[in-house]
Image: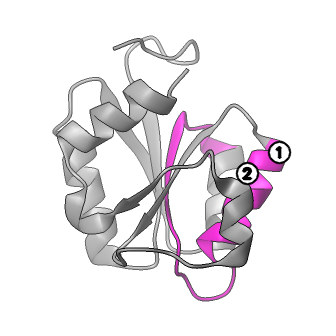
Amino acid sequence: MTLPQTSMASIRVLTVDDQAMFRRVARDVIDATPGFEAIGEAAGGDEGLEAVERLRPDLVLLDVRMPGMDGIEVAHRLAAKHPDLVVVLISIEEQIDIPSAAALDAIPLVRKQDFGPRLLRRLWGEYGH
């Protein structure tokens, strides 16, 4: 695994999800995965955008369905402003059928049920820099 240029010790991960339980699970998975560090959490889209600016993560786990600004809109904004940021859309749903999601075809979508250390390492291996 190649570590990012921005971090000498670990891949910095931000979780953006309106469900506190999933944020806890994500933090536990990240903390249990060598080479990764949970640097923060946000409960919504606006808060997530602010957290990206403040924390400068390498990887963002981004829930698709959130009240207010959903994950698709957040992903579009992040892609425009931070093209090198690795964003992974997460959802409990099997498939997401949102027209604007087609423009985000370079962004992986994973099911929350499948999220674990092996998937986290695989995602970084495929999409990390």
Residues in magenta, as a range = 54-81
How far apart are labels 2 and 1 at the CA level? Answer: 5 Å
Q: Amino acid at mark 2?
A: Leu
Q: Position of residue 29 (x, y in %)?
A: 21, 48
Q: Give the number of the disc on residue 81.
A: 1
Q: Which residue is mark 2?
A: 78
Tell me the quarter of the image containing the C terminus: top right
45 within the magenta span? no
Please identify the quarter of the rendering in which residue 13 is found.
top left
Secondary structure category for the residue under label 2: helix
Residue 43, image x, y percentages: 50, 73
Seen from the viewer's position, the closer of residues 89 and 4 is 89
Where does the image place residue 89, in percent across and percent down from the top left?
50, 59
- Please tell me whether residue 55 belongs to the stretch shown in magenta: yes
Badge 1 element: helix
As displayed, is residue 95 above or below residue 38?
below
